[in-house]
């Protein structure tokens, strides 16, 4: 897993650059201001770093950065989950920033968010900047360093802490709302009791109104029904509609033999007779129905009145009472659950237990990893001009549980033999801090998952034999991983497997930076320049050749 190709267009002072990169240790050198760190900046942007219009070369519309990596199988699940698996053995990341500062990113040709680029970048590249030593004095950075070395589940611990705090807050809120909840529960219970006495049923209100209207007009309805029945079938011997219809049929039947048209009329009269008799039967039934008895009106009128009064007192539409009862019951149940402090306390206890388990697991890993990391960095210090120095990772127990566990890691160092280790920011000089940062970077990077390691002038402040050791450490690291290092030190550059030279030229009044591989005599001259400055002497050339010849092919 390595960075194979880097392409830049209109980036800062780079007009156009196509750079092939190889496995092993690659040194990037050049005069001050030539733009060596621009390549590191470009890699960071390709991996989702913060974009800005200042990255766009003056006069250009936009800058573009493309970085092509090997695509290891371990990235397959992430690429598939994010819909970016091209099936190719390579992985292409692309980033563009226009002159207005608007930024866009792509992974294997698919649009990607900056968060996606950063997530992928963390799995591909580990960058150590020239001010990496500053993080050694920041508690959060120290904790992250140790947890990464220990393989501790810091994210799981943080989630357990947040869950515990959330449950605690819910319990506190319940206690604070006890009085308010009790008042609301009492009010709801009274309202529910009042409605339950009425026991309204869904759809009942419409039926009650219909029955109430009929009973309120019962006398008029009965009178109309009885009069209509009497008109159809009189019982006192007076003429009625059915009798008249029968007489009409008799008159026409006697003459139908003579006038055939009477047959059609008779057929209609017979149909009318059947309908009138059916109507008479319906009226008799209507008049005899007990529910239209006016005496039942009082009970029905009382229920309608009670319904109206309850709806008015509760400020609810009468027809909405059944549904409102259900809503109040649901709210009362919810308030009961919210006020159930015993249940909430049980949830707090369970969340605390989960946190304790997570914190204990992280603590165990930290206590196991701390001396192992300290021993490895101490060994590296002996090679970096700090003979007899001791590095420690102290775990100071916190007074209370925290989001990050039960202890606070602190880095302590004794820069010289015979001295007592103290907090790193109290005893280490700037140069010593830089060398410590390099020792830690080399130690921890060797165990990391990223295939490409980038060191941006982390060798600042060292020289002589220490510089030679730094170079050999980086070369050794390059046997396992791809290492890119921006350096000013000839001793470091001479240890590289590949060497890239960065130069700056003025063309048509504009400054441009270019990068080219150097080998053979070109590389010898560059190493000589780094040894003796712009004036290259025979001595510096001889020294450069000697340094390069010492490196195995």
Image: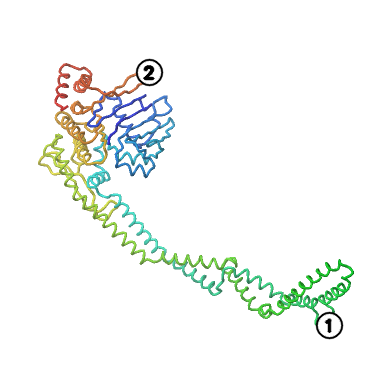
In the picture, the quarter occupied by the C terminus is top left
Residue 326 picture location, percent across and down? 51, 67
Say if 273 sits above or below 354 in the image. below
Give the number of the disc on residue 490. none
In the picture, the quarter occupied by the N terminus is top left
Query: Where on the picture, by quarter, is residue 280?
Result: bottom right
Residue 160 in view here: yes
Say if 552 sits above or below 202 in the image. above
Q: CA distance from mark 2 to mark 1?
A: 130 Å
Q: Earlier in the sequence, mark 2 or mark 1?
A: 1
Q: Tag count in the figure?
A: 2
Give the number of the disc on residue 509. 2
Position of 44 with respect to 541 (left or right) is right
Residue nearest the viewer, comparing 70 with 500: 70
Residue occupying the point 86% across, 67% down? 260
Query: Where on the picture, by quarter, is residue 32?
Result: top left
Query: Mark 1 highlights which residue?
Result: 237
Q: Residues within 10 Å of mark 1 (few under 14, many from 20)?
A: few
Query: Where on the picture, by quarter, is residue 195?
Result: bottom right
Residue 196 picture location, percent across and down? 53, 73
Residue nearest the viewer, comparing 525 with 477: 477
Say if 95 sits above or below 183 in the image. above
Judged from the image, the secondary structure of the residue bearing numbered disc 2 is loop
Q: Residues within 10 Å of mark 2 (few under 14, many from 20)?
A: few
Position of 296 with respect to 504 (left or right) is right
Of the residues tagged 2 and 1, which is closer to the observer?
Answer: 1
Residue 14 picture location, percent across and down? 35, 25
Position of 203 with respect to 5 (left or right) is right
């Amino acid at each position: 897993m390595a960075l194979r190709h880097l392409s830049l267009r209109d980036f800062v002072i780079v007009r156009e650059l196509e750079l092939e990169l190889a496995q092993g240790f690659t040194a990037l050198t050049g005069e001050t201001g030539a733009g060596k760190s621009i390549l590191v900046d470009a890699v960071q942007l390709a991996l989702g770093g913060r974009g800005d219009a200042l990255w766009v070369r003056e006069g250009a519309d936009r800058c573009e950065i493309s970085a092509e990596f090997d695509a290891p199988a371990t990235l397959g699940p992430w690429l598939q989950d994010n819909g970016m698996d091209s099936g190719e053995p390579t992985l292409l990341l692309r980033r563009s920033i226009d002159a207005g500062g608007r930024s866009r990113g792509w992974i294997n040709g698919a649009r990607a968010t900056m968060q996606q680029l950063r997530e992928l970048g963390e799995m591909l590249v580990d960058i150590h900047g020239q001010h990496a030593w500053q993080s050694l004095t920041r508690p959060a950075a120290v904790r992250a360093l140790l947890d990464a070395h220990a393989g501790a589940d810091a994210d799981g611990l943080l989630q357990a802490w947040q869950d515990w705090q959330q449950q605690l807050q819910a319990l506190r809120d319940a206690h604070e709302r006890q009085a308010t909840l009790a008042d609301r529960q009492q009010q709801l219970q009274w309202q529910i009791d009042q409605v339950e006495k009425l026991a309204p049923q869904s759809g009942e209100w419409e039926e009650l109104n219909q029955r109430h209207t009929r009973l309120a007009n019962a006398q008029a309805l009965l009178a109309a029904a009885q009069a209509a029945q009497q008109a159809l079938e009189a019982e006192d011997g007076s003429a009625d509609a059915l009798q008249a219809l029968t007489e009409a049929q008799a008159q026409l039947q006697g003459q139908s033999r003579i006038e055939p048209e009477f047959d059609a009329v008779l057929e209609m009269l017979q149909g009318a007779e059947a309908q009138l008799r059916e109507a008479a039967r319906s009226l008799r039934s209507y008049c005899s129905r007990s529910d239209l008895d006016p005496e039942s009106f009082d009970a029905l009128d009382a229920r309608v009145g009670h319904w109206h009064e309850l709806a008015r007192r509760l400020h609810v539409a009468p027809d909405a009472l059944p549904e409102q009862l259900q809503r109040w019951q649901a709210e009362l149940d919810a308030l009961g659950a919210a006020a159930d402090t015993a249940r909430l306390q049980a949830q707090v206890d369970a969340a605390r237990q989960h946190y304790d388990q997570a914190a204990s697991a992280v603590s165990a890993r930290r206590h196991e990893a701390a001396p192992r990391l300290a021993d490895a960095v101490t060994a590296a210090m002996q090679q970096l001009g700090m003979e007899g120095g001791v590095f420690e990772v102290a775990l100071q127990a916190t007074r209370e549980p925290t989001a990050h566990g039960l202890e606070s890691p602190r880095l302590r160092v004794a820069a010289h033999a015979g001295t007592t280790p103290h907090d790193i920011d109290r005893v280490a000089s700037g140069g010593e801090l830089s060398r410590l940062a390099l020792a830690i970077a080399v130690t921890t990077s060797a165990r990391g998952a990223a295939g490409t390691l980038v060191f941006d002038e982390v060798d600042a402040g060292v020289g002589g034999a220490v510089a030679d050791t730094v170079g050999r450490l980086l070369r050794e690291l390059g046997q396992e991983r791809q290492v890119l290092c921006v350096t000013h030190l000839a001793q470091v550059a001479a240890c590289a497997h590949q060497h890239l030279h960065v130069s700056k030229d003025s063309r048509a009044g504009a400054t441009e930076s270019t990068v080219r591989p150097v080998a053979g005599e070109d590389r010898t001259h560059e190493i000589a320049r780094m040894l003796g400055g712009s004036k290259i002497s025979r001595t510096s050339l001889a020294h450069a050749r000697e340094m390069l010849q010492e490196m195995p092919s």
